[in-house]
Image (cartoon, helix red, strand yellow):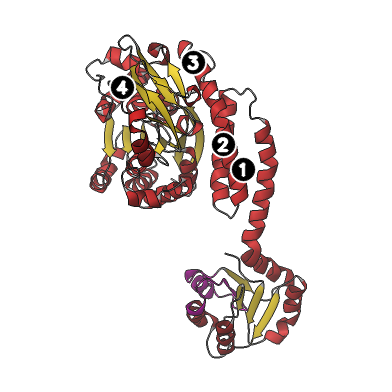
Amino acid sequence: MTRPRTVLWVDDEIELLEAHALFLQEHGFAVERAANGDDALALLRRQGYGVILLDEQMPGQRGLELVDEVRTIDPSVPIVMVTKSEAADTMRDAIGIELQDYLVKPVNPRQVLTVVTRLIEGDRIREQRLARDFVARFRELESRRGQPMGWREWIDMVAELAQWEVRLSQGEQGGLREAQQTLQSSLRPDFAKFIATTYPKWLADPEGDRPPLSVDVVSEFLAPVLRQNGSALFVVVDCLRLDQWEVLKGMVTERFDVEVSHYYSILPTATPYSRNAIFSGLFPLEIQRRHPKWWGDRDDESLNQHEAELLTEQLRELLGADVPVRYAKLSTAVEGEELIRQLPSHLAQPGVTALVFNFIDQLTHGRSENAILYEVARDTTALRSLTRTWFEDSALTRSLREAHRRGVPVIVTTDHGSIHCHSPATVFAKRDATQNLRYKFGEDLRAENPDAAITVQDLPAWGLPRARLGVRLLLATGDAFFVYPTKLREYQARYRGAFLHGGVTPEEIVLPVALLTPRGV
C-alpha cells in the first residue's frame, strides 16, 4: 500500500518543533500540526496521513489514550510516539499496543526524518533496491543459460532462482517476476538434457563426482548428527518445493541455527520411489532384490508401508549397531494431536524420531479434484501462502518447538518437489501402462512430441527394477503432463494448471535438506 507523503504531528508544544516540521517539508513531506487530540481527530477525519507523530504527555487526552480513536478512523496509519517520558512503563505500553516507533525528546530533525521516511517510503525504497539487485543478477543468470553446468552449478542456479521467486512475489514487481519465471522456464530443457545424460552415469559410478541423491540423505546428513548427539528428529515433508522451503526457513530461525544443503531426488520423482530411497538408502532395484515382498508390481502408496523397517536397517548398517527408531506418518489433525502427546517421551530417548508430513502432498493432489482448493492455490505464490498458513499452527511446528525445548537437533527435508503443469503431452501406450501423469511405465510407450519426455529403455541403469520385455519408462519434462489421444479433452480440463510430480524439472529434483540446531539451550 502506498501511503501519502503527509505527516500529522500532534503535540501541545508544537511551536517548539517548528524547525523539525520545516526540515521534513524541505525533504518533500507535507506536515499538518495539531496541539491536542480533538484537533488531531478532526484533521484525520477529513483526510488520511502517511504517519502520525504523537506526543504522550498532553493536557486532556494522553497520547496513548488517543491511539484507539485514531485506529478507529484509520486502522493502518503508522503511529510514532514522540515524548519526553523515559519511563519504562510508557515504553512498554507503546510496544504493547504495537506503535510503529518510539522516540524520546529531545530528538533531532534527521532522526525524525529517518523514521518518517522508513514508515512512508520504506516499501518503495525496498522495492527499488530489490529491482536493482535482481536486474544486476538477472544478467549474470541469463548469461549462463545454454552453457554447460555441473550438478553444483545447477544447485546454485536453482536455489537462487527459488529465492528470487519468493522475494519478488512479496512486492509489486510484476515485470521482474515475469522475467524470473521466463528464465526459470527456459532452463528446464537444459536441465532435462543434463539429467538424461548424467543421471545413469552417477548410478554407474557411485564413487565418482555426483551429487547427494535420495539414497544418501540418511548417510550424509542424519547419521553424522546421530554419531555426535545420540538422538535426532528426522522430518520429511512430502512434496516440498524449494520456494516453499524458503518461506518456512524464515519461520524457524528464531529457535534454530539453520544450515541448508541440497540434494537431487532419484527418478521418478514420486513418493514410492524417492521416499523409499531416503529411508532405505537403496535404489528401487536394490529394494526389490533385498526385500522382494515389500516391492511388488503395484505403484501406489502401499509401496511405502515399510519405511520404519527400512530406516532401522539402514541405520544399523551405517552405525554398526541397532538404533531405536520411532516412526509416524501424519495425514490428519487427529494423527497430529496424537503425535504431540507422544513426542516428549520420544525425544527424551536416544535414537531417531522420524516423522512424515503429508499435508502439502495432499494439497497438491487435492486441488486437481476440488474446485475450492484450486481457487485458493491457483499458482506458486498462493501455494506458498497456504504452506505458510498450514505450518504456523501445524503439528510440525509444535514438534520443532518440543525439539528445541529438549535441545534435540533436527534434520528437515522432503522427498520430491512439484511442477505447475500447463502443457498436455500426448502419449501412445498399450492398456497396461501406469496411470501417472508425469511418468509412465508400459510397453511400447512413446510421446508424440519427443521433447516432452525422456525415454528410458534400460531400467536397471536408472536404478529401477527390470520389467518384462518391451517395458520402458517415460519421464515428463518441462511443464508437460501426459494425456492419451482418446481422453485428450478430459485430461486437459482436469489437470491443466495442476501441481504434479514424477518428472524431470529442477522444481521436482533439486531439494533442500536442513540441519536445525537448537539455540540457547
Q: Is residue 432 magenta?
A: no
Q: Quadrant of the N terminus?
A: bottom right
Q: Position of residue 225 (x, y in %)?
A: 42, 30
**Disc 2 target residue:** 184
**What secondary structure is found at the residue carrying circle 1?**
helix
Of residues 323 and 290, the one nearer the viewer is 290
| Disc 3 + disc 4, Cβ < 8 Å | no
Q: CA distance from mark 1 to mark 2?
A: 9 Å
Report which residue position mark 4 lands on.
Answer: 433
Viewer-side residue, 461 vs 286: 461
Relative to 21, 376 lies left or right? left
Q: Amino acid at mark 4?
A: Ala
User: In which quadrant of the rendered view does residue 331 lie?
Assistant: top left
The residue under label 1 is: 179
1 and 4 marks in contact (CB < 8 Å) = no
Please say whether residue 219 is visible from this viewpoint: no
Q: Amino acid at mark 1?
A: Ala
Q: Which residues are magenta?
A: 72-99
